Amino acid sequence: MYLSDLNINNLTVIQSLSLQFGPGLIALTGETGAGKSIMLNALDMVLGARAKTDMIRQGAKQAQITAQFALSQDEMARLNEALDQHGLPACESGQLLIRRQLNENGRHRQWINDGLTTAAVIRDLVDPFVDMTGQHAQQRLLKPAFQRDTLDAFGHLDAQADKVAQLFEQVMLTQQEIINCGMDEQEKLRRQDWLQYQIDEIANINPEVGEDEKLAEQRKRLANVAQIQVQSNEVLELLTDGSANALTLIQRAAPLMDKLVQADPALDNLRQQINDAAVLLEETSRDLHHFGTGQDADPETLSQLDNRLDALYRLQRKHGKNIEDILSLHAEMEQELSQLRDLDAHLAACEKKLQKQFKTLHDEAQILSASRAAQSKRFAELICTELADLGMPHGRFEVCFEPLSENATKVVTRNGITLGRYGAENVSFSFAANPGQKMGALQAVASGGELSRTLLALKRVLQMADPVPITVFDEVDAGVGGGIGEIIGKKLAALGEFRQVFCVTHLGQIASQAHQHYRVSKEVVGKETQTTVQALKGNDRIEEVARMIGGEALTEVTLAHANEMVQSAATRVSVH
């Protein structure tokens, strides 16, 4: 695998950038602040690292980073299997496309092969293929946890270490359970009383899953029946049953209408309409009365429903849970109460379980310790070989193991044996750069330049043990001079013979060794600062290397020296 294309838009000082890369060692050079590290940060972010909205270029609403990788057939097969497990589109034609969009509202989005996904999935998929070594790698190198993890990575002991960590968590849980059992008699009785009260309260109400929803619906129907009856009676009062109702008024009007018809027979049609209205009112009243009496409001049932729902809702408010969770809580409290009533037996069972778990943890920790000890010798030998090649022929490097102290945090001790989450010992690196110098902790005795070379040695050894297709170094030359820089450059170039290596450097001795060389610069356009990147070849590259070794004022001597360095590197012989 190698990164073939990187496109960056609206990221800090980068407005728009489109770069193409090939395999080998790729040097990124330029003045401090030009944007070299931003390019590597962009690559890190598109591969799932944390993204910040303040990285979006001022005035833009979003930034976008796109990375395209060329894959071998084996790599494509591995990735496609993993992509299929996540429901993502497969790689086609030997290409992997990753795109990330940073939005000013903080809701960033990312895609793999145009399939929407998460940053965590991207990290999980790409992590085996890319090794990012940033500017703060030296600080991480000084941390014991990093040193331990480095040894485990070299020896392929990660799975073994994870198993120990899982067993340790089990032991800690059981130990905490035993601690929880260690209460005095009064406290135990108080807890029993409280549990019994809660259990009885839930048992007395005896809720059923879904009961509250079913009763609420039933109550709603009954409440509507009562309302229908009230409204029906009101209508009946107006139509037929009230002291002054419509039917009585019509009946009083009928005799009067008869007299009008006698005076004028032409009004007989109107009299018939009044008679029909009286009949219609009587029928309507009768039907409405029948409907109303057919509805059973049953106030007693409604009251019972209200009381039951109040009890259920009170229980839910008290425990802040739904009925299903309340029933689970009830079972848990019954179990705890049972354990408290037979605390001695439960404590004995926990002790027996802890003894068995601790033995399993101890056995696995011993296996891990033996594996680390065996791997450490070969690891240290390889590091010393690399350090010698890097200008420290008398450099000594050892892996030290120190038993855990029972007073340390997050450990468990039984029968004089102390174990932790990461095994039975602390792992640390000891170092001495010169003959006769006493070995000491790496963080205490190594200078900045020595740390840079040690870090590179570690990366070289890890690459030999478990090759990673793409490696990124951000200023691995910190604290070293030109002579050592040339050696580092050759080492990086040797790595580049087999994989893609990106290196941000300020040393011409390293840049001259690169298979590809890019100069990063910034310029002010209008009132805006923009970063540009130029692929250097021929005289442009020689001038950039000359600037790096001799300063801005180029002379024939520095140009000739730079030309010799570039030409010599072009005929390099791999150093392994």
Image: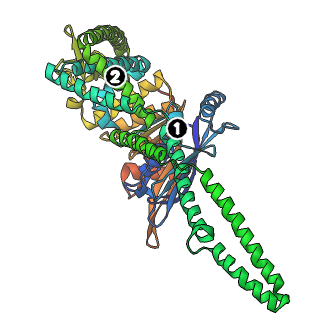
In what quadrant of the picture does the N terminus appear? top right
Q: How many discs appear?
A: 2
Which residue extends farthest bottom?
A: 263
Instruction: Note whether 344 is above or below 61 in the view shown.
Output: above
Instruction: Mark 1: give few (<14), some (14-19) or many (20+) Cα within 10 Å.
Output: some
Q: Is residue 284 above or below residue 248?
A: above
Residue wearing tag 2:
334
Residue 536 visible: no
The amino acid marked with disc number 1 is Val
As drawn, is 433 to the left or to the right of 320? left
Question: Which element type, helix, strand or loop, lies under badge 2?
Answer: helix
Examine the image and state in which quarter residue 325 appears.
top left
Q: Which residue is mark 1?
A: 121
Upstream in sequence: badge 1 or badge 2: 1
User: Relative to the observer, which residue lies in front, 125 or 503?
Assistant: 125
Q: How is the image coloured?
A: rainbow
Determine whether the residue tagged by mark 1 lies in a helix, strand or loop: helix
x and y, in percent, of residue 471 in the image: 48, 35
